[in-house]
Every structure is written in C-alpha cells, then in structure tokens.
Amino acid sequence: MSSLLDKKQTGIVFSVQKYSVHDGPGIRTLVFLKGCPLRCAWCSNPESQNFQPELAYNRNKCLGIDKCTRCVDHCASGAITFGEDEKIDLAHDLAKNELHLAKICPNDAIIIYGEEQTVDKVLKRVEEDEMFYARSGGGMTLSGGEPFAQPDYALALLREARRRHINTAVETCGAATWEAIESCMPYVNTLMFDIKSMNSDKHKEFTGHSNKAILNNLKKIREHFPKTKIRVRTPIIPGFNDTEKDVMEIINFVSELPGEKCEYEALEYHRLGQPKYDNLGREFPLDAAKKLDDEIFAKIKILVDKYNNF
C-alpha cells in the first residue's frame, strides 16, 4: 500500500489527547477511535461506543433560553424543548440527524463526539510533539473505543506512523477479528491488551460479549508476534472481578502464554466517566454506590507485583 493512499484513508476519531504518560512508554499522543463491540458496565468513555458521530449536551454550559435560543431556531426534528430550569432539554434519540446544532451553540453546551479525519490530518497533530517523543521514548497510541474495530483506518494510521518513524502503541479490548489484529501487529511497538475476566458467563453479563475470542486473540498474538512488548491490563471492578481468585486466574493464563513474558497491570476502578452518560442521555450501567475496597486492591497489587518481579 502506498503512503499516498494511507494518508488519504479516513476514519472516525472522537478525541486526540496530548501529553499522556500512562498509555505506553514515554510521553504520548492518544488518538481515540469511535466504535466498540463491548458494552462494559463501567466504561469511562461511553462516547466511544457507537461508531458514528453523535451529539452530547452539557446542561451546565447552556446559557439559558433567556439569553440564547439559536439551537431551538435551527432544530427541525423537535429534539429541543424548553426545560423547567430555563435551559433547553435535548431528546438524543430525535437529534441523531441534527449534528449541525453543535456548530450553532455559542458556549459548546452541545458538542459532537466523532469526526471523520484523514490519516494525514491526525498524524500532523501527532507530529507536533515529536521533540517530546524523542526525549522520552514516546509516540502515538491508538485507543478507543476499539481501534481494531476500524481495521483499515487503524492499519493506515500505524503503517504511516511507522513510515514517519513514530513509535506506536495500541490499547485494545481484544474483541476484534483476528484478520484485523494480524494485519496491524507488524506496525505495533507496544500492545496494551485488556483481560477483564476468565469467567465467560460473567464476562458476557458485564460486557455483553463472550471472552472466548478475546483470549484466543491474545494467544495468537503471542504465537505470531512473540517479541512484541505486551502489557495485559485488568480494570478491577467491584462485584465483577475484585477478588484475589479472579486476578490469579488471569495471571495464570498470562504466565502460560508463549513468547516473551507479558507485563501485567491491575487498574483501579473509578467513576470519572459517569457525567458523560448524562451528557449522552444515557444511564450509568453500574451501581453508582459500588466502591472498590482499598484493602482488597492492595492485596491484588501484591499479586501483580509478585508476577511482574518473578
């Protein structure tokens, strides 16, 4: 594939975040791609789940109908009405074809999550921070959503980044076709792969998807790309996988993979993405009252450290 074709390849991106130090080695620029087959009950990026651009509404930013009614005047679907607090109400199901409303709102109370962008446009933003990558060993990280769910776009981004000598990393939930993953892996320097649970029934209950293909994909990656740096990660979720037994089952699976040893990381549960659900007109799926026990997480960290240092 020529560089010219790769640069013109388009996909749906919902955010580009600079100066990250937690998503791969060094200082990195995160490129968030839209679309994910999973519906994790704790997802902190609900705006990443749907594949197409969508509207979100932050009520706190609305100027109020006494100061502005631009969105009302330009809405043809009846999706916008007046609320009791003198601000607008947005019916998200009716506003699917009203993306132009985001350009009209003067205070960014209505925004769009997701924009079609070329590979060249994205990488020009990534290249703005090349000096930081050179000093820190950083680069570009594809995140989401699920990057491999836009396989042609992810491949073009990774391949063109390699041509431009940009270090690459991918964050994946593993729920993708093997063909999509296999085509991208030769251009990935670091892979961060989520394993949420070894229990297939529990995995399906909390994510809407079996873990069978996910686990098989990680095995195949290690068989076909034995030297690629891989960090397996598990978000520790109260009531789902917050026991030493759950974590040890994952560690045992990871320790038996072929190829070079994978790193392992347990991620502490948080609810920082909860306000986004309100902005998207959705309910937070997980019981908001649930909290991760500090003592339990400390014990889990001991298991993780023991594996990594063995």
Image: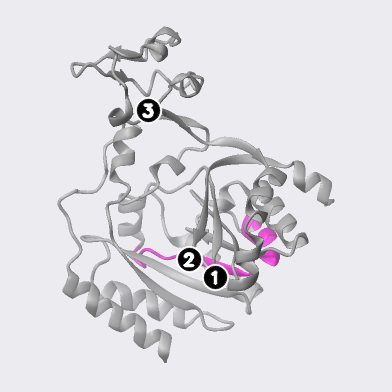
Q: Residue at the far bottom: name it.
A: 310
Residue at 66% x, 73% y is: 224
Left or right: residue 304 versus residue 52 is left
**Looking at the rendering, which quadrant does residue 276 occupy?**
top left
Q: Which residue is mark 1?
A: 26
Left or right: residue 115 versus residue 104 is right
Q: Which residue is mark 2?
A: 21
Left or right: residue 247 versus residue 145 is left
Q: Which residues are magenta?
A: 179-199
Residue at 24% x, 48% y is: 286
Q: Secondary structure at mark 3?
A: loop
Q: Earlier in the sequence, mark 2 or mark 1?
A: 2
Position of residue 262 relative to residue 33, above or below, is: below
Q: Position of residue 87 (x, y in %)?
A: 26, 19
Q: Secondary structure at mark 1?
A: loop
Q: Position of residue 67 (x, y in %)?
A: 32, 14
Q: Are marks 2 and 1 in contact (CB under 8 Å)?
A: yes
Q: Are marks 2 and 3 in contact (CB under 8 Å)?
A: no
- As shown in the figure, which amino acid type bears the numbered disc 2? Val
